[in-house]
Amino acid sequence: MPRQTQRILFRHRRIHAVPGQQPVTGLLVDGERIVAAGDATRLADDAATVVDLPGVAVIPGLHDAHLHTAGYARSLTEVDLRDADSLDEVLRRVAAHAATLPPGAPLTGGGWYADSWQQRTLPHRTQLDALLGDRPVLLSSKDEHSVWANSAMLRLAGIDAATPDPPGGSIDRDEAGQPTGILREHASRLGWDALSATYSESSQALTEAVGGALDRLLSLGLTAIHDIDGEDARAAFAALHADGRLPLRVHKAIRVEHLDAAIAEGRRSGDGDGWLSTGPVKMFADGALGSHTCDMTTDFVGDPGNSGMAVTETAELAQRAGAALDAGISVATHAIGDHAAQRVLDAYQQVLGDRGGALPPGKKLRIEHAQYLRRQDLARMAGLGVIASMQPTHCTTDFELTDQLLAGHQLVAYGWKTLLDNGIALAFGSDAPVESPDPLPGLAAAVGRVRRDGRPSGGWQPAERLTAAHAVDAYTRGPAFAAGREHELGLLQPGYLADLVALDVDPLTAGPDELYAGRAEATVVGGVLRWQR
């Protein structure tokens, strides 16, 4: 073979080109693609440049199938309440953050989780009023399905005792009928819409914030993401791409409120290029467990009469899914509760039945989260070809709340192995900023079902633990399949894109403790070393 001067040999003693198979020591890359994978000594003669990769092992680039990039970018400069274990600690952090802001500027952020506080009571607007007066405050719960607002924020949003609950949402009220400051599901949009209308964010500022966030993701070993945020995020990605500053691959979802406009514009899933492509439409069937709004078949324990909330009814899910598929757009629907998942499958089954029983070529159906499922729905989910887009660290965060609120429910809970055993494809991600975007804790949760501190001993529902190879597959080939790019992403084989990460731990042999402590050492996207520690 004649020498090709543009070719680069990436060399390492342990390259898991196909996780679960025998490692290789060299990857020969021409442009963005791998042309050979094997023994580095034999490949060296055909390379103009040799790059020795650091770390303990090299694997295919990690791929986050569910990430809110604009939300993550904003969270980096907002108040972070995620690990606060009491209301007093939350208020202390809010006050400290307020001291860094200009007078009158709104205070935003989130991550509060009342179920983890020493006193498990929901917060109230008056607690923020006493602290910050007339400064508008809007704080997301950890699951981002509820917000906590002060009185100034409620006034800004036009919410008072006479404001009706919006469809698919609720306003918590006290005994006198006054809003407490807790807004759930679609009611939270009243706050966010008022805030964005009053305090505008420039597109340039968001673009720069998103660019900084993507650089952080690159440093975690991520080479591709599926973004779930709105049109402002899409514009930021497009601006970065036009400037040659998009460092990793973005599969950009369409929020359901923009579906009609996207169809009118002629967007199709998979359109774009290898760096920025159109993803599925993202719909919502229900809320979340932490907000007690996920749509369940039975009531939450200790909360009689509350079995969650149908954010979107089944008929509308079917109508929207059908319109998307007819336009060439894949469909991804948020469903956490078992009844929500059942309704999503009902909608998908109706849509496919109305269209001859088969998906359009290259199009995908997904359930986002799929945390609680009825066992009798698994065969139908597999038969419809529905992908389970799941986030392993949600399991390790929520297992105590699951045991508390869903005790006695006969459910498949975070059932990764059961789903695989039933022929259902997995695509893993983080749901950042709800959880950290770092994929190594996600791998730790997937193989151990334990937290960083080792709880619970032996893992929560340990029969659902994944093998290391299956866990890595769900963070590499799984998201590639969900994006329709399984023939060029997720493996380090000839013809595939040269996206890879060097880690200071081998995820094919490491236990949860090592994975929690692990980190990326270098990230290559498209044959270019984009980041190195």
Image (cartoon, helix red, strand yellow):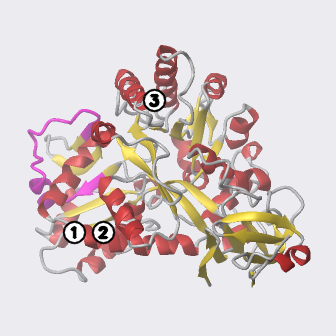
Q: Are marks 2 and 1 in contact (CB under 8 Å)?
A: yes
239 left or right, relative to 389: left
Residue matched to label 1:
202
Which element type, helix, strand or loop, lies under badge 1?
Answer: loop
* Placement of 138 over or under 523, stated as above or below: above
Magenta segment boundaries in residue numbering: 147-170
Q: Residue 328: percent from the left, percent from the top? A: 44, 34
Question: Disc 3 or 1, which lies upstream in sequence?
Answer: 1
Mark 3 Cα shell of 10 Å, populated few (<14), some (14-19), many (≥20): some
**At 51% from the left edge and 30% from the top edge, which residue is drawn?**
341
Q: CA distance from mark 2 to mark 1?
A: 6 Å
> Residue at label 2?
206
Q: Is residue 455 something one can see in this rendering?
A: no
Give the residue drawn at x 45%, y 53%. 115
| Disc nearer the start of the sequence (3/2) | 2
Above or below 259: residue 101: below
Q: Is residue 14 visible?
A: yes
Residue position for label 3: 299
Of residues 478 and 308, the one nearer the viewer is 478
Which numbered disc covers residue 234? Answer: none
Is-magenta flag for residue 60? no
Front one among 160 and 252: 252
